Image (cartoon, rainbow, N blue to C red):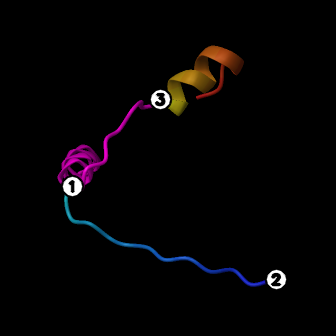
Amino acid sequence: MSNYGFGVTVPGSFDEVIEKTIEALKTEGFGVLTTIDVKATLKKKIDVD
C-alpha cells in the first residue's frame, strides 16, 4: 500500500491561519458551514482532555 499526500506550512498563529483560510474559501465561492471543537466534545462525552 502506498501512502501519499501533501502539506503546506503557513506562517502565522493557528487562529490567524484559520481566518485567512476562511477568507480564501469565500473568495473562491466556498463557505464554512460549521466548526467542531473536538477538544470540548471529547471532554463532554468521555471526560478526556
How much space separates mark 2 and mark 3, taking CA atoms?
32 Å
Mark 2 is on which residue type?
A: Met
> How many other residues sit within 10 Å of disc 2, few (<14), some (14-19) or many (≥20)?
few
Q: Mark 1 points at which residue?
A: 24
Left or right of 8, for residue 41? right
How much space separates mark 1 and mark 3, taking CA atoms?
21 Å
Give x and y (percent) for residue 10: 26, 66
| Residue 35 image-quadrant placement | top left
Q: Residue at x 35, y 38 (%)?
A: 32
User: Which residues lie in the magenta part?
Assistant: 13-36
Left or right of 36, for residue 14? left
Q: Which residue is drawn at 69% across and 80% down?
A: 3
Q: Which of marks 2 and 3 is in front?
A: 2
Q: Residue at x 39, y 32 (%)?
A: 33
Q: Is residue 44 above or below residue 18?
A: above
In the rendered image, the quadrant that contains the N terminus is bottom right
Q: What element carries label 1?
A: helix
Left or right of 22, for residue 37? right
Q: Name the residue under label 2.
A: 1
Q: Name the residue under label 3.
A: 37
